[in-house]
Amino acid sequence: MADIQFITAEVCPFAQRTLIALLEKGVEHEHIEIDLRNKPDWFGEVSPYSKVPVLRHGEIKVYESSIINEYLEDVFPEPALMPADAAERAKMRIWIDFDNVKFVPAFYKVLLADDADRRAELATSITEALLFIEREALGTRAGGPYWLGEALSLADVAIYPHMERLAVLEAYRGIAVPKECGRLKDWLGVMSGRASVRKTAHDTDYHVQSYANYADGTANGTTAKDMRL
Ligand SMILES: N[C@@H](CCC(=O)N[C@@H](CS)C(=O)NCC(=O)O)C(=O)O
């Protein structure tokens, strides 16, 4: 058994964040795939929130993808996925927080909402978030193709998976990426060329199919329940 166990579900964008970090760092691990619609009995013991991803490192159990990825950075510092400079590290965390707190909940809520006014309100907040990213993140970099500039960081790793799934919003809710978001499109192109991303990515059909139960209101897993709150 490997010292690191990665408990995951292929469909999950949060787990994709951690798999990209593991691959970027070349961390050997045991990959344990679980069926989220039929969770094994042991899953509750390792995952207090009943969600993937979970990382087990010997006796240590870490959950929440953003926290797992910082744990990986602490334990396997090379190659670095966090800037050395404190201000840049803060900036990286601010954008990961923006993704977790603003963008990702709106992504799920607009799929789950059955009220037309609520959907319209969430669609507006998603469009505004994409324009904000274009202007305030990608538009203020010193230079370079990644979120913070020259080097790949945990901001790229955290934000990429839901951006890979933007077509789901267009397919089910008619929310297109604004034409002003040229830098975002370029960044997606750069990210999708990385080996770690190619190994973890899926195409539009796969993602559209994966979110069908969110869009038709039948999703009843932990994530759907949390996002309906
Ligand atoms: N905030 C968590 C979110 C993880 C999450 O929502 N994972 C989903 C799959 S994408 C899950 O395991 N859901 C369990 C369920 O819906 O029952 C993280 O960043 O790790």
Image (cartoon, grey):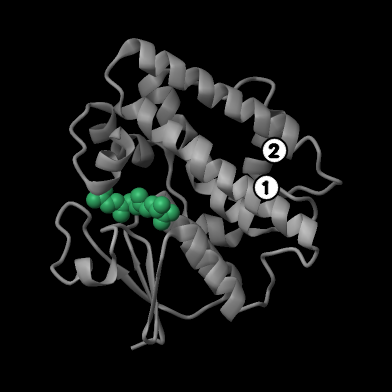
Residue bearing the label numbered 2: 186
Residue at 25 percent across and 40 percent down: it is 225
Rendered view: 194 above or below 180: below
- Looking at the rendered structure, the kind of residue marked 1 is Val
User: Can residue 164 be seen at all in this image of the molecule?
Assistant: no
The reply to whether the C-beta atoms of the residues labelled 1 and 2 are less than 8 Å apart is yes
The residue sitting at the front extreme is: 229
Residue at 13 percent across and 68 percent down: it is 41
Rendered view: 216 above or below 6: above
The quarter of the picture where residue 55 lies is bottom left
Percent of width and height locating residue 27: 52, 78
Percent of width and height locating residue 3: 41, 87
Helix, strand or loop at label 1? It is: helix
Q: CA distance from mark 1 to mark 2?
A: 6 Å
Q: Give the numbered dot on residue 109.
A: none
Front one among 99 and 40? 99
Percent of width and height locating residue 85: 80, 63
Rendered view: 5 above or below 196: below
Which quarter of the figure is the C terminus placed in? top left
Residue at 30 percent across and 28 percent down: it is 112
Front one among 229 and 10? 229
Residue at 79 percent across and 50 percent down: it is 149
Q: Few, some or many C-alpha atoms within 10 Å of disc 2 (few <14, some 14-19, many ≥20)?
A: some
- Relative to 18, is 55 on the left or the right? left
- Relative to 228, is 41 on the left or the right? left
- Relative to 125, is 154 on the left or the right? right
- Relative to 143, is 4 on the left or the right? left
- Looking at the rendered structure, the kind of residue marked 2 is Asp
Asked if the residue at label 2 sits under 8 Å from ligand 1, the reply is no
User: Can residue 143 be seen at all in this image of the molecule?
Assistant: yes
Q: Give the numbered dot on residue 190.
A: 1
